[in-house]
Image (cartoon, rainbow, N blue to C red):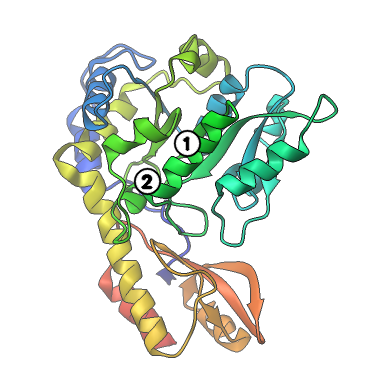
Amino acid sequence: MIFLKNDYSLGACPKVMNALVETNLNLSDGYGTDEYCREGADYIRELIKCPTAHVHFLMAGTQTNQTALAAFLMRPHHSVISADTGHICVHETGAIEATGHKVIHVATPQGKLTPEDIERVIEFHEDEHYVLPKAVYISNSTETGLIYKKDELLALREACDKHDLILYMDGARLAMALTCQDNDVKFEDLPKIADAFYIGGTKCGALFGEALVIVNDKLKEDMRYLIKQRGAMLAKGRLLGVQFNALLKDNTYLELGAHANKMAKILVDGIKAKGYEFAIPPQTNLLFPYFPPELIEKLSKSVMFEPYHLKKDGMKTIRLVTSWGTTEREVEEFLNLI
């Protein structure tokens, strides 16, 4: 089978796996107080040029989103604004709502929030009969494979400042966002944009793990208590520090993201060359081509992919995802099939 279903089904990239093996028999403190996590946190602060940032290593994206947003939404009536395609809306089993906080989802044409979306939500939630919006959630890259340019992110920052909202960025696929050919955002820009964000590992070459970075001083207090209470503090926390050290040093993290994007670009060019269109303009490693139903049925016998809900002129979309481990041979085999 040609695997184009997601970007997290492989284990770890060789560099990460080698680092785990090399440190396997080293003794260290637990719960993220070890030298590997300290070194990883210091390196992230250096990378983003924000020496005061707090860095916490967690195991998974949903866990990170739930732990962070439950902590940041400090009162029971606080809510978070998200695009309706946002991970916290559709792929986390109501994890945020399970903490007692409503997710206000906004219909967006292609999964990107705008300042105008925020203004409409604020205008509608006018008094105590509604939940109070207190945070904005975005993903970069988004669940539709698009990225936010720097001017778009700064406009969101301005809208959040205007309405005293926390801006939180889900960086599950940050490696692909930062290496997209259309991107103009760098690591050091992130602390100027978001109050908190995470650097994704699970979908970017790690065996598992995400690095939560908190910039806003008001959100830092007691975070380790809150992480522990949510069951998100790994006893063998050094496994996370080891992986992020291996990923982020020597540019490995961005190289892996660039490879996923490169494989996606070959797919895009090949699909377009055969006369097919895309439901969403391709930018990173998530692709949504329109195919005839009979071709989709044929592909399902040889390719692992996700169906998608968009339709046009009798055509249906599927979701194709490339990863750090996708090979040119797999891409070529897929193009031969269509």
Decide if residue 152 is on the left or right side of residue 48. right
Which marked residue is nearer to the observer: mark 1 or mark 2?
1
Q: What residue sits right under mark 2 in the picture?
A: 174
* Residue at the image point whose x is 73% and y is 19% from the top: 76
Q: Nearer the viewer, residue 161 or 129?
A: 161
* Residue at the image point whose x is 55% and y is 72% from the top: 318
What kind of element bears circle 1? helix
Tell me if I can see residue 52 in this picture: yes
Residue 332, compared with residue 175, is above or below; it is: below
Decide if residue 85 is on the left or right side of residue 338. right
Which numbered circle lies on residue 32?
A: none
Which residue in the rendered view is the most extreme toward the left?
250
Q: Position of residue 210 (x, y in %)?
A: 40, 34
Q: What residue sits right under mark 1 in the picture?
A: 157
**Can you tell which quarter of the image residue 71 is in?**
top right
Which residue in the rendered view is the most extreme toward the right?
129
- Assess disc 2: are there few (<14), some (14-19) or many (≥20) residues with their C-alpha within 10 Å of its C-alpha: many
Which corner quadrant holds the N terminus? Answer: bottom left
**For marks 1 and 2 on the same chain, the one whose residue lies earlier in the sequence:** 1
* Residue at the image point whose x is 81% and y is 30% from the top: 130
Q: Please, what is the three-letter code of the amino acid marked with disc 2?
A: Leu
Decide if residue 325 is on the left or right side of residue 135. left
